[in-house]
Image (cartoon, rainbow, N blue to C red):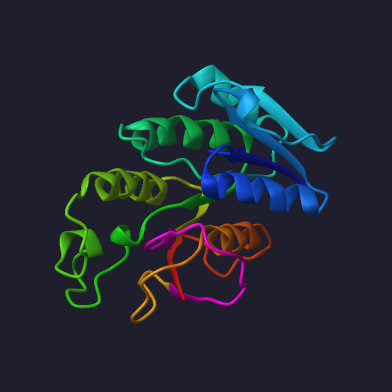
Amino acid sequence: MNILILGGTGRVGGQIVTYALHDGYRATVLVRTPERIQINNKNLTIIQGNVLNKDDVIRSMQGMDVVISALNTDGAAVLSESMPLIIEAMENEGIQRIITIGTAGILQSRTTPNLLRYQSSESKRKSTRAAKEHHKVYELLQQSTLEWTIVCPTYLPDGERTGKYRVDRNVLPEGGVEISVPDTAEFAYSQIKSNDYIKSRVGIAY
């Protein structure tokens, strides 16, 4: 299987790269600074480029079976500006499956079900900027023809891989307050073999 990992130099993305290579898959990463990838593996292809450059995105998609995006909000509009390019390139290349890392802010609120968590009193975050970016991505994926899954962690410390966590479709597991980077990456990575959460957001927490 050929997996394209976007955001492969980030905390979650880097962990997903490790999992994919460990399982013997062919992993491709599109990165601005290749030097930040400190892995030497025959199954790893590093493409230097930018997710905001249409040609770079198209180039990285060729021959892929699945796309995993662990791009972060980066204090800018990278998420919402890159997603239309990613969706278009995937649809043109005939790639159906995309798994993205979102945020618990875009899950439905349990207290006010017609609102997303970041729009309700359920969220304790003072800033909604990142959640609004992820919300735009969610809307773009909903409008696409892709088979998407958005993994939505809450507070994300580095922590360790436990393999034991709770997930819930479209809402945060009751009382969930955190989930480690390795466990978030493990669950997102596991979705390449699962159809359980197609066209769904997934809340994940301990």
Across and down, in percent, residue 120 comes to 16, 65
In this orientation, which residue lies closer to the viewer: 193 or 177? 177
Across and down, in percent, residue 149 comes to 50, 57
Across and down, in percent, residue 114 comes to 19, 69
Across and down, in percent, residue 8 comes to 59, 39
Residue drawn at x 44%, y 63% is 200
Which picture quadrant has residue 170?
bottom left
The total of numbered circles placed on residues is: 0
In this orientation, which residue lies closer to the viewer: 139 or 27? 27
Residue at the far left in the pictured view: 121
Residue drawn at x 17%, y 60% is 119
**In terms of secondary structure, what is the magenta stretch mainly?**
loop
Instruction: Point out the stretch of residues depicted in magenta.
Output: 152-168
Whether residue 143 sits left or right of residue 161 in the image: it is left
Q: Is residue 197 above or below residue 86?
A: below
In this orientation, which residue lies closer to the viewer: 108 or 47? 47
In the image, residue 29 lies in the stretch drawn in magenta: no
In this orientation, which residue lies closer to the viewer: 12 or 59? 12
Whether residue 138 sits left or right of residue 44 in the image: it is left
Which picture quadrant has residue 5?
top right
Residue drawn at x 55%, y 18% is 55
In the image, residue 157 lies in the stretch drawn in magenta: yes
Residue at the far front in the pictured view: 159
Residue drawn at x 57%, y 31% is 92
